[in-house]
């Protein structure tokens, strides 16, 4: 007689195991990490696998402990603090007992500002996000080289200080860790005891995964409103698992998805260009059709909690502003450029809100509610006099 496994109850136990040793910043984080643990047992059911990233601005924020607990719950955990790209290629190819779940602690030593470039590792982590993707390398001795494709699809969790390369951040569920407050208590993690307990849960997750493999393979879960494109790719496996588990997990998973996706967009610092566009829309050109460059720079450099006043030791200037905005296109498919603006004192170079409107719509998060009421309609360019 086959025993029916209660997926919701099992996920509840996995979440409770995390809560014993981890203090995550939000309830959404506990939900996301629990679903990520489960998804590592079902990789072949999905087209992609999200990366899990525990990041913090300071040491002592519980990142390594979070990774340790994850390690007990996922299949064939492989700690890869100093692993080379070549070693990872061969590990994921399955020659040594099956595809591992790769856990990178101290990821900032690999991708941090003082670590130099690690393009092979970056390429491996990026390529392994998508099922079926291989990395091609030359293998052999001396002149006897052959091109060989190495599988790269595997689950990856990382922990570190600061941020990550843009291409990894957008493929990740981001958990912003922080130091425990004095009133936040956790149980001491004892390797000899708790690894065994975690492994027991791991084995039960693996057994449950076998029972829902077929169901989640054909699942295309409904996304929360506004979650599209890359964030939807990241969350699709986690929501599919929540739906398969049932109980309260489908509701909690979608709430967590909406919360963490919004937080990632709010805290997204991977693109200075997007930050510039958003600040121009919400703080500089708000309510006006055009503004001279000198006035734009004054307003940008005066913004609190913005990077513009200190761009490598000096404030943002007109040349760099022009270079950054020139990467974006107007609705007429032309680069955004400064144009003449006639003022009482003469003609000055500046920027028109209409020229930025297309980039605002494509790249920026929705405007804050405070900004919306003050936005004014713009005249079409054909109706404006040439300045």
Image (cartoon, rainbow, N blue to C red):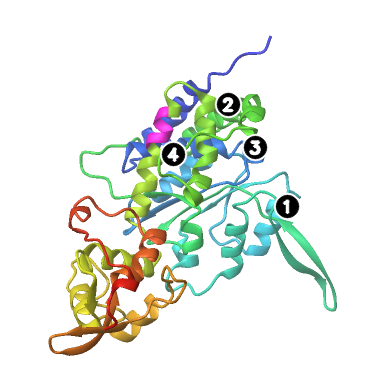
Whether residue 87 is visible to the viewer of this picture, yes or no, is yes
Mark 1 or 3: in front is 3
Distance between the Cα atoms at labels 4 and 3? 18 Å
The N terminus, quarter of image: top right
Q: CA distance from mark 1 to mark 3?
A: 18 Å
Q: Are marks 2 and 3 in contact (CB under 8 Å)?
A: no
Q: Which residues are magenta?
A: 251-255
Q: What predominant SS class does the magenta segment belong to? A: helix
Looking at the rendered structure, the secondary structure element under dot 2 is helix
Q: Residues within 10 Å of mark 1 (few under 14, many from 20)?
A: some
Distance from disc 2 to disc 1, alpha carbons, whole Å, reads 25 Å
Front-most of residues 212 and 258: 258
Front of the two marks 2 and 3:
3
Between circles 4 and 1, the one closer to the viewer is 4
Which numbered disc flags the more N-terminal residue, 4 or 1?
4
Q: Is residue 21 left or right of residue 83?
A: left
Task: Confirm or deny contact between disc 2 and disc 4 (CB under 8 A).
Answer: no
Q: Pointer 1: what residue?
A: 93
Q: Which residue appears at 19% of the width and 69% of the height?
A: 303
Residue 381 x/y as whole percent: 33, 72
Q: Position of residue 307 (x, y in %)?
A: 27, 71
Question: Which residue is located at x 22 percent, y 76 percent?
Answer: 291
Q: Earlier in the sequence, mark 2 or mark 1?
A: 1
Residue 52 visible in the current orientation? no
Task: For mark 4, give the secondary structure.
Answer: helix
Q: Earlier in the sequence, mark 2 or mark 4?
A: 4
- Mark number displayed over residue 204: 2
Q: Earlier in the sequence, mark 1 or mark 3?
A: 3
Which image quarter is the C terminus in?
bottom left
The residue tagged with tag 1: helix, strand or loop? loop
Picture residue at 58% right of the left edge, 58% below the top: 125
According to the picture, the residue beneath numbered tag 4 turns out to be 32
């Amino acid at each position: 007689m086959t025993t029916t496994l209660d997926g919701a109850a099992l996920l509840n136990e996995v979440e409770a195991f995390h809560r014993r040793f981890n203090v995550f910043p939000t309830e959404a984080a506990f939900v996301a990490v629990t679903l990520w643990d489960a998804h590592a047992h079902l990789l072949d059911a999905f087209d992609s696998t999200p990366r899990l990233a525990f990041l913090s601005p300071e040491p002592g924020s519980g990142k390594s402990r979070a990774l340790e607990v994850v390690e007990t719950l996922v299949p064939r955990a492989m700690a890869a603090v100093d692993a080379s790209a070549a070693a990872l290629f061969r590990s994921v190819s399955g020659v040594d007992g099956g595809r591992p779940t790769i856990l990178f602690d101290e990821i900032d030593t690999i991708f941090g500002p003082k670590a130099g470039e690690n393009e092979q590792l970056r390429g491996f982590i990026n390529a392994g996000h998508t099922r079926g993707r291989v990395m091609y390398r030359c293998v052999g001795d001396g002149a006897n080289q052959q091109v060989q494709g190495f599988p790269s699809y595997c689950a990856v969790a990382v922990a570190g200080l600061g941020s990550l390369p843009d291409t990894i951040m957008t493929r990740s569920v981001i958990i912003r860790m922080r130091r425990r407050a004095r009133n936040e208590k956790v149980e001491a993690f004892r390797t000899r005891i708790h690894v065994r307990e975690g492994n027991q849960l791991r084995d039960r997750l693996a057994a449950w995964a076998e029972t829902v493999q077929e169901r989640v393979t054909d699942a295309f879960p409904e996304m929360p409103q506004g979650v599209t494109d890359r964030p939807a790719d990241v969350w699709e496996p986690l929501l599919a698992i929540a739906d398969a588990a049932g109980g309260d997990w489908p509701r909690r998973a979608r709430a967590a998805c909406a919360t963490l996706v919004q937080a990632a967009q709010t805290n997204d610092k991977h693109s200075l260009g997007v930050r510039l566009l958003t600040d121009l829309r919400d703080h500089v050109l708000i309510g006006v059709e055009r503004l001279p460059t000198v006035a734009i720079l004054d307003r940008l450099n005066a913004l609190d909690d913005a990077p513009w006043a200190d761009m490598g030791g000096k404030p943002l200037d007109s040349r760099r502003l022009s270079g950054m905005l020139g990467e974006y296109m107007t609705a007429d498919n032309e680069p955004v450029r400064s144009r003449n603006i006639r003022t009482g004192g003469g003609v000055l170079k500046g920027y028109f809100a209409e020229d930025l409107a297309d980039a605002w719509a494509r790249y920026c998060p929705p405007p804050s509610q405070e900004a919306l009421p003050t936005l004014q309609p713009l005249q079409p360019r054909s109706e404006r006099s040439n300045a």
